[in-house]
Image (tube, rainbow, N blue to C red):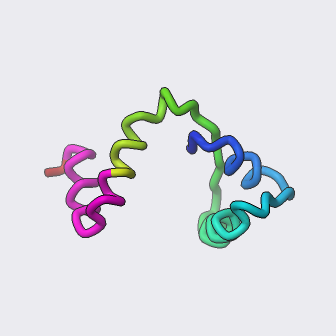
C-alpha cells in the first residue's frame, strides 16, 4: 500500500513515469522475488501510522529493527 497514486499507477501499468523510473524499476525487481504481490493505493489520511513509522526509521536507520518489533508489540 502507498499513499502515492503516481507510484501505484506506474507499478500497476506498463507506463513508466521518468521522474520515478529508478524507484519503480527497483520495486519491480524486488517484487519479482515474491510468488504473489499487489500494489494498492491508500489515502494519506488512512496511512498516518505507516508514514510516522517510516519517517522515524529514516531519521534513525540503526534502530529500525528494534522499532519495527516494538511497533508490532514484540518488545
Nearer to us in this view, 18 or 26 = 18
Image height check: is 68 above or below 1?
Answer: below
66 within the magenta span = yes
| Residue extending farthest left | 75
Q: Is residue 37 left or right of residue 55?
A: right
Q: Quadrant of the N terminus?
A: top right
- Residue range corresponding to the magenta coloring: 56-73
Image height check: is 70 above or below 25?
Answer: above
Rendered location of residue 50, percent (x, y): 41, 42
Q: Residue at x 65, y 48 (%)?
A: 39
| Residue extending farthest front | 19
Secondary structure that dominates the magenta span: helix
Q: Is residue 57 left or right of residue 11?
A: left
Image height check: is 40 above or below 37?
Answer: above
Nearer to us in this view, 68 or 38 = 68
| Residue extending farthest top | 45
Rendered location of residue 2, percent (x, y): 57, 44
Q: Residue at x 73, y 66 (%)?
A: 21
Rendered location of residue 9, percent (x, y): 75, 46
Nearer to us in this view, 36 or 4 = 4
Residue 48 placement: quadrant: top left
Rendered location of residue 53, percent (x, y): 34, 47
55 within the magenta span = no
Q: Residue at x 64, y 41 (%)?
A: 40
User: Exactly how many numbered labels are in the figure?
Assistant: 0
| Residue extending farthest right | 15
Amino acid at each position: 500500500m502507498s499513499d502515492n497514486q503516481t507510484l501505484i499507477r506506474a507499478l500497476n501499468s506498463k507506463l513508466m513515469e521518468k521522474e520515478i523510473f529508478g524507484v519503480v524499476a527497483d520495486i519491480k525487481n524486488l517484487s519479482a522475488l515474491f510468488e504473489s504481490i499487489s500494489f494498492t493505493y491508500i489515502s494519506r489520511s488512512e496511512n498516518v501510522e505507516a508514514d510516522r513509522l517510516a519517517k522515524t526509521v529514516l531519521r534513525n536507520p540503526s534502530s529500525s529493527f528494534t522499532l519495527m518489533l516494538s511497533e508490532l508489540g514484540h518488545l
